[in-house]
Image: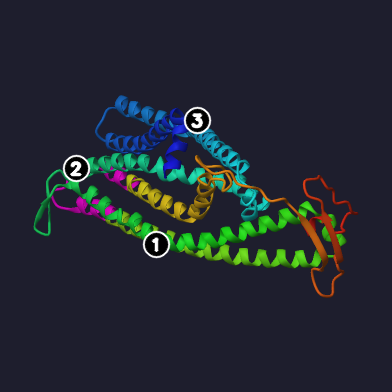
């Protein structure tokens, strides 16, 4: 997570602007609903001038809510692009400084997928688990306060619940506290999502490696008549990738179902309490207060569902995040450490003795009795026609 905080710190001002715009947008949405409820209350008791003024205020907020999405989307896109580019630059620079053995573990296909795809997913996930939860908790607190205010308007006297005197404003915070069990449940079953996502990542990297290698040397594959071998291997990898992705989809959708059910039940309970307060003797509920509670209830659950969604996203993306972070934190195994002793380098030699090779027993032999010696400390070129096995040998 330290890398995430360092990455976020790269554009603090833009993130601050993103937070301000996001909270303002959420405030406008809730203000539209609250003002609509107020307008409903004023229809039968206020003068026409006051009703018109309230209506114009509601129209202004509604238009602002629609137009506000454009700058918010622009800031979000620019922020994600800058952060992902920063991450890709750091990762690319780290790869360029790696020692040769690193490229035996990560072939060009793997590195292409990691640098150009996984970094974007990593940046978005880190932003969603570092920045967005803070904003969602602020939105949750504000929405809870707004719903509590409307509950007070529904019933100002304390309620007798199981022999306890409970003020009406305390009902929404209690329900929200119960609803927070949903993100906690998602965090406990995140291992299943990570396991399924790890399998998807493995097959995705395997496919990327296979396609990259094949497209870099198509003439040699054709010369060795190995098209069928590569095609069969590609089809097998596609089938394995499809099965892994289907398992991941089932796992994630199961978790999403577990996420939606508790919040739906909590929303039903919240609206049930509102209806009970309206029907309870001694209640002085107004139509606008009821409308406000009915429209605010889904918005009250929205931040909780978002928090659970961030946990699902983090669990599904964590294998990719670990892959990116492991390369960022890796060091070349051949770089000299302070106080390292001088080592003697042996004279490099390359020699082939009667090498015979073919891809399959019944396929044409690429090498048959190949023998040669490369002189040490000299630049030597291996010259042959296309498809005669230069790349295959090395």
Residue 394, horizontal then vertical, whole percent: 77, 56
- At label 2, counting other C-alpha atoms closer than 10 Å, the crowd grade (few under 14, some 14-19, many 20 or more) is many
Q: Please give left or right for residue 135 compared with residue 239 in the image.
A: left
- As drawn, the label of residue 83 is none
216 relative to 168 in the view: left or right: right
Q: Are marks 3 and 2 in contact (CB under 8 Å)?
A: no
Q: State which tag comes first along the sequence, 2 or 1.
A: 2
* Residue range corresponding to the magenta coloring: 270-295
Which of 349 and 258 lies nearest the eye of the viewer? 349
Query: What's the mark number on residue 71?
Result: 3
Image point 85% across, 65% down: which residue?
A: 367
Rendered residue at 39%/32% (across/down): 24
Circles 2 and 1, Cβ within 8 Å, touching? The answer is: no
- Most common secondary structure along the magenta stretch: helix
- The image quadrant of residue 351 is bottom right
Crowding at mark 3 (Cα within 10 Å: few <14, some 14-19, many 20+): few
Q: Find numbered disc 2 in the image and state the secondary structure of the residue it sits on.
A: helix
* Closer to us: 215 or 179: 215
Q: Tell me if residue 249 can be seen.
A: no
The outermost residue toward the right is 385
Q: Residue 325 location in percent, x, y?
A: 50, 47
Asked if the magenta segment contains residue 71, the reply would be no
User: In the displayed structure, would residue 128 be above or below residue 223?
Assistant: above
SS under mark 1 = loop
Asked whether the beta carbons under mark 3 and mark 1 sit within 8 Å of each other, the answer is: no
Q: Which residue is mark 2?
A: 152
Give the numbered dot on residue 189. 1
Element type at marker 3?
helix
Q: Mark 2 or mark 3, which is nearer the start of the sequence?
A: 3
């Amino acid at each position: 997570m330290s890398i995430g905080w360092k990455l976020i710190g790269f554009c603090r001002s833009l993130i601050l602007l993103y937070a301000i715009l996001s909270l303002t947008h959420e405030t406008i949405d809730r203000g539209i609903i609250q003002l609509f409820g107020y307008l409903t209350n004023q229809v039968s008791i206020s003068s026409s001038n006051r009703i018109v003024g309230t209506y114009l205020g509601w129209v202004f907020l509604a238009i602002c809510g629609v137009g506000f999405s454009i700058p918010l989307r622009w800031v979000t896109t620019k922020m994600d692009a800058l952060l992902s580019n920063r991450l890709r630059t750091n990762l690319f620079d780290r790869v360029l400084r790696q020692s040769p053995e690193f490229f035996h573990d990560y072939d060009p296909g793997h590195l292409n997928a990691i640098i150009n795809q996984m970094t974007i997913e990593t940046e978005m996930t880190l932003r969603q688990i570092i920045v967005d939860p803070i904003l969602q908790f602020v939105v949750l607190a504000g929405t809870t306060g707004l719903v509590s205010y409307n509950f007070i308007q529904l019933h100002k006297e304390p309620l007798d619940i199981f022999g306890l005197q409970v003020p009406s404003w305390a009902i929404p915070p209690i329900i929200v506290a119960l609803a927070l069990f949903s993100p906690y449940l998602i965090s406990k079953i995140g291992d299943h999502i990570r396991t399924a996502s790890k399998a998807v990542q493995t097959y995705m990297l395997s496919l990327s490696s296979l396609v990259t290698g094949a497209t870099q040397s198509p003439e040699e594959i054709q010369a060795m008549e190995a098209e069928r071998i590569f095609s069969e291997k590609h089809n097998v990898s596609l089938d394995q990738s499809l099965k892994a992705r289907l398992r991941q989809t089932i796992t994630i959708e199961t978790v999403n179902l577990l996420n939606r059910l508790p919040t739906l039940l909590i929303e039903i309970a919240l609206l049930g309490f509102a209806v009970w307060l309206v029907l309870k003797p001694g209640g002085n509920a107004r139509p606008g207060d009821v409308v406000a509670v009915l429209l605010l209830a889904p918005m009250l659950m929205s931040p909780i569902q978002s928090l659970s969604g961030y946990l699902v996203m983090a669990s599904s993306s964590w294998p990719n995040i670990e892959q990116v972070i492991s390369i960022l934190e890796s060091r070349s195994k051949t770089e000299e450490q302070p106080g390292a002793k001088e080592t003697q380098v042996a004279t490099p030699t390359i020699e082939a003795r009667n090498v015979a090779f073919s891809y399959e027993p019944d396929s044409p032999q690429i090498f048959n009795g190949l023998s040669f010696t490369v002189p040490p400390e000299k630049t030597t070129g291996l010259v042959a026609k296309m498809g005669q096995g230069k790349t295959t040998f090395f």
